[in-house]
């Protein structure tokens, strides 16, 4: 009896252990199946998502992204909607104009009707479009406040339209005081539909006709009334003060340049241009050689006291223009009596010798450019050269390679005085022999 009871207890214990063991194993197996997903051996692994790469653009496309036409891409549909279909068709030609692509700010269009444009068989509508388009926003109220005969330079370089106004005697004194009594004429053509469109970027006025093709002397009254017409260049000219008031596009270009320079690491130059604003506003155009803020604080402190020596007034010289200048060409600066000199000619890009001005290489050519101002970045500030030293170099050098040889020989005790961005030597010429005549404002901006 005791043996049977003992056997029964053992059997019950075995059954209990079996019951507790197998459900646990089943639960663990089920948990593993939940946590570890099963991947069929026949199916390939899921493809990994490829990182999105930015679309590649060509150099011309990148240039057009910053061009005048890209910022006014709405101009053709706007003109088509307003009924100026001829101008809308010609609008894409603005991307082909160097002057138009250099300006990316707001503009005002004085739009002639399609019928008036078709009446001029010999006229080039793309040229007329550029001559009817001016930088800046000129609403009808602003145009009425301009002095009689004010000239505004168009996006066709060196060509200006004339703004005049006529007050009607039939309008009441109250309306005249409000400024609504004036008829505004652009080049003798009345604005019959003012402020047709204004989105803060483009202003469109409708004209009764079209302004005749402008003369290259339209910005200079004295030359227009003179019997002899001297050579006039759109890119490099030095006009006398005008008799009639002129809307200086330079004011708009200066603001554009200062903003772009300040946003690109040239805040000191932008501040210097603001300080000398009154001296710069009267220029036709200018070429500026710049030193960035980092270089100035790293040792090029001399630039802050010689900004005027780094500005070539009334000359718009791109880097390609500079490369075409022969050895020894002087470049007058705002510093009276002081000029820059081409010490190594670029040879139009065909010579292996890099262009040097006052023995300094250009770091970033055409850093910033608009309708009136072009800026080139330098490795170092320009040193002042004595005229005799320049003539001596030209005699000994006799060409592109000779000038570089003279530069390489100019060391002080066998040590380079300065280093350019590529580790080359930029030797400082002999000390300048100062004249006995005191020059005003020779210390600073």
Image (spheres, rainbow, N blue to C red):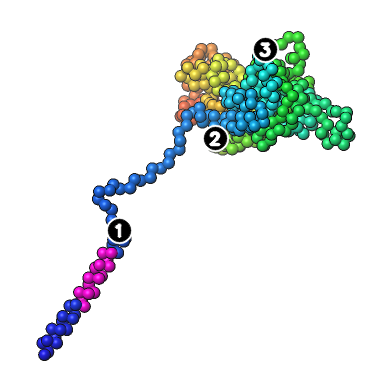
| Image height of 102 relative to 122, above or below | below
* Disc with the residue nearer the chain's start (1 vs 2): 1
Which-is-in-front pick, marks 1 and 3? Answer: 1
Asked whether residue 193 is in view, the answer is yes
The dominant secondary structure in magenta is helix
Q: Residue furthest top?
A: 228
Dividing the picture into quadrants, the one containing residue 86 is top right
Asked whether residue 147 is in view, the answer is no
Mark 1: few, some, or many residues within 10 Å (few <14, many ≥20)? Answer: few
- Per the model, the C-alpha gap separating discs 3 and 2 is 41 Å
- Which residue is pictured at 61% across the width and 24% down the height? 90
Q: Nearer the viewer, residue 302 or 7?
A: 7
- Which residue is pictured at 61% across the width and 37% down the height? 262
The quadrant of the rendering that contains the N terminus is bottom left
| Image height of 274 relative to 283, above or below | below
Whole-percent x and y of residue 247? 73, 27
- Per the model, the C-alpha gap separating discs 1 and 3 is 87 Å
Tell me if 194 is positioned left or right of 9 in this view.
Answer: right
The region drawn magenta spans 16-30
Q: Secondary structure at mark 1?
A: loop
Q: Nearer the viewer, residue 308 or 352?
A: 352
Query: In this figure, which residue is indicated by the disc labeled 3?
Result: 231
Mark 2: few, some, or many residues within 10 Å (few <14, many ≥20)? Answer: some
Return the mark for residue 315: none
Q: Secondary structure at mark 3?
A: loop
Tell me if 18 is positioned left or right of 100 in this view.
Answer: left
Residues under numbered marks 3 and 2 in contact, where contact means CB atoms less than 8 Å apart = no
Q: Nearer the viewer, residue 208 or 399?
A: 208
- Which residue is pictured at 66% across the width and 28% down the height? 83
Query: In this figure, which residue is indicated by the disc labeled 2?
Result: 295
Q: Nearer the viewer, residue 326 or 218?
A: 218
Query: In this figure, which residue is indicated by the disc labeled 1?
Result: 36
């Amino acid at each position: 009896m005791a043996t049977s009871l003992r056997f029964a207890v053992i059997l019950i214990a075995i059954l209990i252990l079996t019951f507790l063991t197998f459900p646990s194993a089943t639960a663990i197996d089920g948990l593993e199946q939940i946590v570890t997903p099963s991947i069929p051996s026949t199916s390939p692994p899921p493809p990994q998502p490829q990182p999105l790469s930015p679309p590649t653009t060509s150099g011309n496309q990148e240039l057009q992204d910053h061009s005048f036409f890209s910022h006014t891409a709405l101009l053709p549909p706007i003109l088509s909607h307003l009924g100026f279909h001829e101008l809308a068709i010609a609008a894409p030609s603005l991307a082909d104009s160097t002057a138009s692509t250099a300006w990316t700010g707001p503009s005002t269009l004085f739009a002639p009707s399609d019928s008036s444009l078709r009446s001029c068989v010999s006229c080039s509508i793309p040229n007329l479009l550029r001559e009817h388009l001016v930088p800046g926003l000129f609403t009808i109220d602003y145009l009425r406040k301009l002095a009689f005969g004010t000239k505004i330079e168009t996006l066709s370089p060196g060509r200006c339209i004339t703004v005049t106004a006529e007050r009607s005697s039939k309008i009441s004194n109250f309306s005249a005081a409000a400024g609504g009594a004036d008829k505004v004429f652009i080049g003798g053509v009345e604005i019959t539909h003012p402020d047709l469109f204004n989105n803060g970027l483009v202003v469109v006025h409708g004209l009764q006709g079209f302004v005749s093709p402008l003369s290259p002397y339209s910005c200079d009254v004295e030359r227009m009334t003179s019997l002899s017409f001297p050579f006039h260049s759109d890119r490099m000219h030095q006009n006398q003060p005008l008799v009639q008031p002129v809307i200086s596009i330079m004011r708009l270009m200066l603001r554009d340049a200062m903003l772009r320079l300040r946003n690109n690491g040239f805040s000191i130059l932008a501040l210097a241009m603001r300080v000398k604003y009154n001296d710069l506003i009267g220029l036709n155009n200018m070429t500026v050689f710049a030193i960035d803020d980092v270089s100035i604080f790293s040792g090029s402190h001399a630039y802050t006291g010689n900004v005027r020596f780094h500005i070539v007034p009334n000359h718009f010289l791109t880097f390609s223009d500079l490369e075409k200048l022969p050895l020894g060409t002087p470049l007058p600066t705002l510093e009276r009596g002081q000029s820059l000199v081409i010490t190594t000619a670029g040879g139009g890009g065909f010579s292996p010798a890099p262009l040097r001005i006052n023995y300094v290489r250009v770091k970033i050519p055409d850093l910033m450019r608009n309708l009136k101002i072009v800026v080139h970045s330098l490795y170092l500030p320009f040193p002042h050269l004595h005229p005799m030293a320049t003539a001596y170099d030209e005699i000994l050098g006799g060409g592109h390679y000779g000038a570089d040889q003279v530069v390489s020989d100019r060391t002080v005790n066998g040590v380079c005085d300065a280093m350019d961005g590529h580790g080359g030597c930029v030797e400082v010429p002999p000390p300048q022999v100062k004249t006995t005549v005191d020059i005003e404002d020779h210390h600073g901006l």
